[in-house]
């Protein structure tokens, strides 16, 4: 999948080849049922915070 085809699964923003290369590297993907699901930088960060917020306090 080229960078031009990457679309955030949560917000729908599209990653383009002309975007800043360091920002493009921060996109996250996961393989799901034979395909790939992308998350943009903002949604990946928010998703990580959602996960961290559900961890028990003893974890920290």
Image: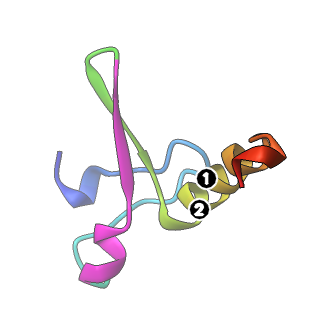
Instruction: Give me the C-alpha separation between circle 2 and circle 1.
Output: 5 Å
Residue 36 is situated, as x and y percent measured from the top left of the image, at: 31, 33
Name of the residue lying farthest toward the left: 2
Residue 2 is situated, as x and y percent measured from the top left of the image, at: 17, 53
Identify the residue at horizontal 36%, vertical 36% (top origin): 30
**Label 1's element?**
helix
Residue 24 counted in the magenta span: yes
Residues at circles 2 and 1 in contact by the CB criterion of under 8 Å: yes
Disc 1 residue crowd, few under 14, some 14–19, many 20+, Cα 10 Å: few
Using residue 34 as the reference point, say whether residue 57 is left or right of it: right
Query: Is residue 12 visible in the rendered structure shown here?
Result: yes
For the rendered model, the colour scheme is rainbow
**Label 2's element?**
helix
Query: What is the magenta range?
Result: 21-32
- 58 or 55: which is nearer to us? 58
Q: Which residue is mark 2?
A: 45
- In what quadrant of the picture does the N terminus appear? top left
Identify the residue at horizontal 69%, vertical 56% (top origin): 49
């Amino acid at each position: 999948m080229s960078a031009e085809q990457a679309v955030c699964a949560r917000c729908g923003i599209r990653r383009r080849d002309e975007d800043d290369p360091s920002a493009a590297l921060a996109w996250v993907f996961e393989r799901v049922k034979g395909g790939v699901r992308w998350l943009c930088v903002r949604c990946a960060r928010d998703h990580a915070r959602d996960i961290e917020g559900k961890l028990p306090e003893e974890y920290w």
